[in-house]
Amino acid sequence: MPSLLSVNVGLPQDVPWQGRTVRTGVWKHSVSGPVMARRLNLDGDGQGDTQGHGGEQRAVLVYQIDSYRYWQRHLGRDDFVPGQFGENLTVDGLPDDEVCIGDRYRIGEAEFEVTQPRVTCYRVGLRMGVPEMPALLVAHHRPGFYLRVVREGLIRAGDPIVRTRTGPGALTVADTDALLYLPGRDPALLRRALAIPALSPGWQGSFRDLLAAQDGEPAADAPAWEGFRSLRVSAVTAETDTVVSLHLTSADGTPLPDARAGQYLTVRVPGTARPAPIRSYSLSAVPGADGYRISVKHEPHGTASGYLTTALRPGAVLEAAAPRGDFVLDAGTEPVLLVSAGIGVTPVLGMLHELAARSPDRDVWWLHGARGPREHPLAAEAHAVLGSLPHAHEHVFYSAATPEERDRAHAAPGRLTPDAVRALGVPPEASAYVCGPASFMTDMRRALTDAGIDPARVHTELFATLPPLTPGLTGTGAPAPHPPPGPPGTGPRVTFARSGVTAPFPDGAHSLLDLADACDVPARWSCRTGVCHTCVTPVLSGEVGYAPAPLEPPPAGQALICCSRPRTDVVLDM
């Protein structure tokens, strides 16, 4: 009969790591005597990062003594102690390839339910002194698993472990782990997993996304061309005192590949600095065979935007990466809300053109905020397209305009605020597409969900760097991105396009993520070993190589920066 060998607990502590500090509860120690298993924790235990660990679905982590023996042989070590793998319960029995999601077990006075495999996280590698440990746990099918506390009670080392219920679906922990992290997924297994009520909501969401892709929802297309290609400026149009539209065609006269309204172009801006800065701009019209259009606002002290809006003339040539981005219209017949502020109008204007061309009978709501007509680019164009649609609702807000200016534009006074959105009575069944400053998008997302719109139907676009995801790090209020400290490296040049940083790859860096960390470029990561794909990043140009190789390669045109190095000069969309 399976038995409980050790109960292990540990409160979060600050641990030095790569010159920074990690708050983690992965260091566990065994305790003697009875321990109370409660809904969220064992008494005396805690987690440093409750986003990835802990909570009702991940209250207790289990690892097996058989896996201890396996890793002792594999790693050639004999220094393991109870809690070595960050687990709360070290057990004899309950192998990952036999225990199933939804199984229930009685231990002492308490009863538990299996909810999910262990989360792949760099901190188990930190605890083990083996950075690649998260990848090894998955690749060797020995992750361990989490338990939900069904009935609270006292447990102690030596208690027998009695299975009280078999989970529906007969999906083992090892198979569930492989289903998320390894290639070659079976759609039938994904459906079986989603039918298991005990599976934690986070894993259910991941499996739903995977199944949607398997069932025919289009995956992100590979970029239409690799790297940068020459585009010729065919026309330059002043939209306002500060916004200029650039019409671009291929330099060789061939038709440009199709793109989606809402996507963006990344351009290398010549004649401004060395190396030439790289910036991204939304396509502001339906991309067609006659070319692309981007609309650029001259930002104060903006070297790149200043050149594009004041110095560029028809006939000039720009280098551009292929259109990218998943801020595009979903197929459907439900109402569409296009919500923008300032220059954020550009991608949603492209969507408006697409709706007029392909779905003119859909219910379209146009919500835009600006200071006044002088700072409202492309207003006449948007108004004309909306006037051609039989089910259009146009709501413009001017925060600093005269009554006459508002009257001419049929604009309401004040800002486009959450209260203003709620007062409009937007349809709750709508899909919304929001672009503007980060604070505006945060406010609009809250307002739209408060109005009854499903949060999954509220889409936002952000051209600044994405919010970082750095689990467990403390004091992460980083300065603005900058070149790495120390002598310049001798490797290929790496450009972080959104952050405006270019630097040679340092001689001692292990990965592109290491360089991003050194430059304080906001990055998103978790496992740091090529397993979880949290760090997946579009590669605008160049080639990367992997060490170690990821367990599942990323899509074409993207890289896992946690385990890759540049083979050539590279430009990353971060």
Image (cartoon, helix red, strand yellow):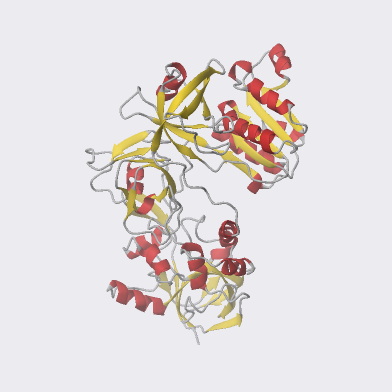
* Residue 287: quadrant of the picture: top right
- Observer able to see residue 42: no
* Image quadrant assignment for residue 549: bottom left
Residue 494's x, y, as percent?
A: 32, 40
**505 on left or right of 371:** left
Pick whichever, 5 or 539, lies toward us: 539
Q: Residue at x 68, y 30 (%)?
A: 367
Between residue 80 and residue 117, name the one nearer to us: 117
Number of dots carrying numbers: 0
Q: Residue at x 33, y 73 (%)?
A: 80
Q: Residue furthest bottom?
A: 1
- Quarter of the image with the C terminus is top left
Residue 254 image offset from top left, x and y in percent:
46, 33
Please state the horizontal and vertical placement of residue 355, each as a whole percent of the image: 67, 36
For image coordinates 34% across by 28% down, the residue present is 276
Whether residue 512 is visible: yes
Question: Above or below — where is 490 with respect to 532?
Answer: above
- 544 relative to 188, above or below: above
Which x, y percent locates residue 485?
27, 38
In the foreground, 203 or 447: 203
